[in-house]
Image (cartoon, helix red, strand yellow):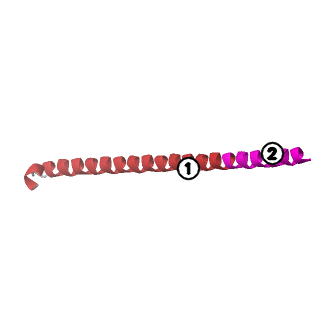
Amino acid sequence: QEQARRERERAEWERMRAEQERARAEQEQRRAEQERARAEQEQRRAEQERERAERERERAERLAARLRELGEDPESLQ
């Protein structure tokens, strides 16, 4: 009877340990998913910034071309 009790306690301890490991693994998976989502968000933000800078550069080029059409040197206006 004593041995049966010890075996039950050991089985319970092993079950609890396995549950803790599972919980840790789930937590790590959530952390990794959050990190992946953060990296994707940062990548989108960087792409948006690159696109904004490209639009600004194109706008500046159009304005400089228009000034040259009007006989002005865009460099002299800085």
**What amino acid does circle 1 point to?**
Arg
Magenta highlight range: 1-21
Percent coordinates x, y for residue 7 in the rendering: 84, 44
Q: Is residue 3 magenta?
A: yes
Q: Residue at x 67, y 46 (%)?
A: 21
Pick the quarter of the image with the C terminus. Answer: bottom left
Residue closest to the far left: 76
| Badge 1: residue crowd in 10 Å (few <14, some 14–19, many ≥20) | few
63 lies left or right of 33: left
Report if residue 33 is visible in the image.
yes
7 lies left or right of 59: right
Label 1 – label 2 distance at C-alpha: 30 Å
Is disc 2 placed on a helix, strand or loop? helix
**What amino acid does circle 2 point to?**
Ala
Residue of label 1: 31
Residue of label 2: 11
Q: Is residue 18 magenta?
A: yes
Q: Which mark is residue 16?
A: none
Percent coordinates x, y for residue 14 in the rendering: 75, 45
Residue closest to the far right: 1
Is disc 1 placed on a helix, strand or loop? helix
How would you classify the magenta stretch by its main secondary structure? helix
Percent coordinates x, y for residue 40 in the rendering: 48, 46
40 lies left or right of 26: left
Relative to the observer, which residue lies in front, 71 or 50?
A: 50
Report if residue 73 is visible in the image.
no
Residue closest to the far front: 2
